[in-house]
Image (cartoon, rainbow, N blue to C red):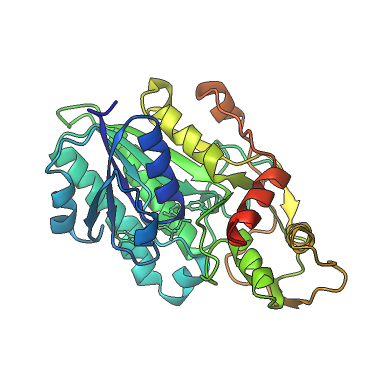
Amino acid sequence: MANKRILVTGGAGFIGSNMADELIKSGYSVTVFDNLSTGDKKYLNPKAKFIKGDVKKPADIEKCFKDKIYAVIHIAGCASTIKSFDDPSADLLTNTLGTVNMISAAIKHKTNRFLYASSMTSYGVPDAIPVKETMPTRPIAYYGITKYSGERYVLATGLRKDLPFKFNATAFRMFNVYGRRQSLTNPYQGVVSIFIGNVLRNEKVKIFGDGKQSRDYVHIKDVCRAWIGAIDNPKSYGEVFNLGSGIRVSVNELVKNIIRAFGYDPKKYPVAYYEARPGDQRHMQADISKAAKLLKWKPEIPFEEGMKDVINWAKGK
Ligand SMILES: NC(=O)c1ccc[n+]([C@@H]2O[C@H](COP(=O)([O-])OP(=O)(O)OC[C@H]3O[C@@H](n4cnc5c(N)ncnc54)[C@H](O)[C@@H]3O)[C@@H](O)[C@H]2O)c1
């Protein structure tokens, strides 16, 4: 494996840094490419080669391919629905143009394996839940549009017959990923870590909407296992997979859970409700049967256990 070098974009961020660690544990060599906009140097694996740069800049990307890259794991991106509405062009440039740039560099350097971080926001308001990969994709958040367009660029490149080699593309529509290293101070992304950060600092918890909206929370370790298991699995080529737990939890339940885990009484802890924000999907739940069938993957970390672990991390344990 050590002769197989994986390029992890966004490898200083929450998902990317965990991915880099797990890849290294599995015996791969890793190059991390990140502009450190939301990522943090302290999460860089010391065994990884770090290249600071921007996916919007082809000259920066070029530096990553000085080594032969076996596969690109493209995780870098703007990961905030809120920010995508505040600054749509920044979101578009990083998520869509950045992905196009990564694909172009992979083609140029004959790297034929490309795995992409897509999102459940690709679905928009689903016709039914649990949502299957075959259901319509009608993103309603600007962020969902850019993540989905990146996904289409990746998969459409995999269909090209004019390339000198077969471009093996896989996209993962990740649901709400949570776990260690998700920022506790970034109010724009990661509902689990936002609430944990609030309770950790004894702040009022702010819920947008009535809190009855539900999400599917999947632990970072389960997510990394799915990606890494897919690298050399031809059944994943040209495919898109939901990565969720398959279980739906309301935001109110999540908040109560977190408050209780910190030893407070949910009935007494201050929680305030605000108007729902644009792009909010009411209910989301993944149908994960495709990943189970083709990747032989299923999530192993129960929500309660995963939450306990991330709260311990937040408390510095
Ligand atoms: N966290 C989730 O629940 C979730 C769900 C679905 C999809 N995703 C996708 O997964 C990816 C990672 O999300 P995350 O939660 O780890 O967020 P994150 O903000 O922790 O990670 C994103 C990383 O990308 C880097 N980055 C941002 N713009 C860059 C640029 N222009 N050039 C190079 N690097 C850049 C950041 O510095 C950061 O390290 C994102 O693409 C996001 O859209 C996340």
Q: Residue 279 at what x, y percent from top left?
A: 57, 65
Q: Is residue 298 left or right of residue 263?
A: left
Q: In which quarter of the image is residue 288?
A: top right
Q: Classify the position of the N terminus by image quarter.
A: top left
Viewer-side residue, 313 vs 35: 313
Reply above or below: 292 against 208: above
Q: Residue 175 at what x, y percent from top left?
A: 57, 48
**Number of callouts in the render?**
0
Q: Residue 265 at what x, y percent from top left?
A: 85, 67
Reply above or below: 57 against 90: above
- Name the residue at the right extreme: 267
Q: Residue at x 69, y 40 (%)?
A: 302
Viewer-side residue, 259 vs 237: 259
Q: Can residue 37 be seen in this view?
A: yes
Q: Residue at x 68, y 41 (%)?
A: 130
Q: Is residue 208 left or right of residue 161?
A: right
Q: Residue at x 22, y 60 (%)?
A: 53
Q: Residue at x 51, y 63 (%)?
A: 183
Q: Is residue 195 left or right of residue 85?
A: right
Of the four image quadrants, the one with ligand 1 is bottom left
Q: In which quarter of the image is residue 228?
A: top left
Q: Classify the position of the C terminus by image quarter.
A: bottom right
Reply above or below: 190 against 219: below
Q: Can residue 284 be seen in this view?
A: no
Q: Residue 31 at what x, y percent from top left?
A: 26, 44
Q: Quadrant of residue 103?
A: top left
